[in-house]
Image: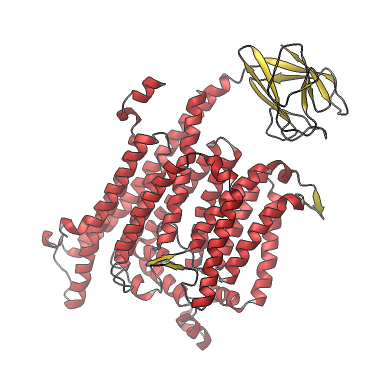
Amino acid sequence: MTLDVFLLILRLLFIVLLYLFLMQVVIAITRDLRKTAAASASLDNKAPPVVGHLIVVDSGPSNILPGTRFDLSPQTTIGRGPTNTIQLVDNFISGEHTRLWFRNGLWYVQDAGSTNGTYVNNQPAREALAARFGDIIQVGFIRFKLAQ
Amino acid sequence: MKAKMNSGIFQRYRWKELGLLIIPFMILVLEMVQLPIAHYFQTQITSNSQQSIPFSTAILPPLRDLIPVFGLIVALILVNLLLSLFFPKADQLLLPLVGLMSGIGVLMALRLGPDVGDPLLGIRQLVWVLLGLIVCMATVFGLRNMNWLKRYKYTWALLGIILVALTIVNALRVKNLNSPTHDQLNFGPLNLQPSELLKIFIVVFFAAYLSENRDILSEGNLRIGPLRLPPLRTLGPILLMLGISLLLFLVIRELGLALLIYGIFLSMMYLGSGKLSYVIGGLLLFAALGFVGFKLFGYVQARFAVLTVDVVNWQNWSLATQDFARNGALQVVQGLIALANGGVLGAGFGLGHTGAFVPVAQSDMVFTALGEEFGLAGLFAIIGIYLVIIYRGFRIAIEASDEFNQLLAAGLTSIFAIQTFIIVAGNMKVLPLTGIPLPFLSYGGSSIIANFIIVGILLRISYNTAMEREGLA
């Protein structure tokens, strides 16, 4: 065997190894994607349970119809921004207005730094306030009843 | 949870990562073995014109010649072990990909070193990569709280600008603007390029600022003709930051970096607001400003003139073009010739001539050096690896839990993407050549360190995401 043949073999070996590596990486990626697809499918099946509703009692200056029901998941945010669980388009609602969460059979309501405030039974909810079903929650100038 | 933690390192060990590292190790050892053989082959070819040189095991290099590569392999295994012990859930694909790329970078520096008149080039690059791995680990360990990055966004922005401003003062005082190293900060024996760090600071700043003002930015209530822009009050800090960094780079004539920063700005604005109109508006503005710059500054015109050189038609070159190809366009023209010499399979590692004939082959033009020695097939594989790194970065970004982490990961990944595009296009005579490094492959300490910081941040974000998932499940 002459040296240039040997060098050619080394060269081909290098390219083969490079592509084998790429193949290995792509296989790892597809496996990963399948796994996350399966995981997200199983997550979708147990979508966040609805543990309560907000029913509009007084729509204030907004054009939301009284009686509208909003589903509440154990962690709910209300605001004008697109990332909120409940998006309310109204000039008196801040981007991130109110946070609600459900723990040990009780709802907790806290203002998320809004301009027009959040109230539970007319008490300002600057700190987290506990709320029971039937209580009135006011977000900006819209009043809701917390219902099951 | 406790039992799960104690279930043994064997189950938590990052086997996938270790498995993916095996082929890179084989590639590195193979090339390290080939280097002295190729050298021997070339000396034999020149000393006796005899057709065939016999192969014997005697010309295989002794094991001690392979020490540089073994050092890198040991370092990568150590990183794998450390990550398995402390961050088992961090992304497992990044390290093998980045390890292979920087390994090829070290080998290329080892190979090009003697040709560009600096025999220690490869060893220095190796030290930088080892340092880079340490910095990467330090980043993964040190970034306990991502909010720390977010909260001090103005500090980072200021720090980056001060670093570059220092460089400029230094450059104006000591050197002239035409020297290739005018953007370095000499710090004892170290030549630092603060602009490499500035790009990270800028992405951190953009990510923090955009994630806080996302709603306002995506609404866009300032109307200029058909365009809807966000209010200037919100846009102000970003535009200021962008303007300052662009100005800095234009002053030191780093067009590539200015292009990189603008590209990062546009992609992060798009990611943050989801509005294609910002990108289109930004590109139009860029084209307009670029045209003004082209008309005003001679050095911009000189860069673009390279694109008009028709290399294949060299026989009919005018005298002016011949002169241009020997001076201003020498790098690009020689690079294209080297690429053509490489062909599909390449000349073979250690058997090309790029180091001797292409100016600055070790950093700016390393892509053509790789192209000559590994051929089109090798270049495709290398670009494939870049694509996978970028895919992985965006994947980490998609999975991240909050907007800041998403924007940060995506922005840092776009650095790799845009930087690779600019320099590869420059080497290929598609865009004017600008001196920014090819990530992981170019010689250069600052660039290696900065890239490993980015990898560290990406690893940490992926680890945080995985931990939050675990906590929820």
Q: B378 or A138, which is in the foreground? A: A138
Residue B330: percent from left, percent from top: 45, 77
Q: Is residue B178 visible?
A: no
Residue at screen point 30% across, 65% down? B111
Rendering colour mode: secondary structure
Residue at screen point 49% across, 35% down? B464
Q: Quadrant of the N terminus of chain A?
A: bottom left
Q: Is residue B296 visible?
A: yes
In which quarter of the view is residue B341 placed?
Answer: bottom left
Apparent side of residue B343 relative to residue B403 in the rendered image (left or right): left
In the rendered image of this protein, does residue B246 appear above or below residue B309?
A: above
Q: Quadrant of the C terminus of chain A?
A: top right
Q: A98 or B96, which is in the foreground? A: A98
In which quarter of the view is residue B373 placed?
Answer: bottom left
In the rendered image of this protein, does residue A22 appear above or below residue B15?
A: below
Apparent side of residue B195 relative to residue B50 in the rendered image (left or right): right
Q: Residue furthest right?
A: A61
Residue A79: percent from left, percent from top: 74, 31
Residue B186: percent from left, percent from top: 43, 68
Q: A148 or B29, which is in the foreground? A: A148
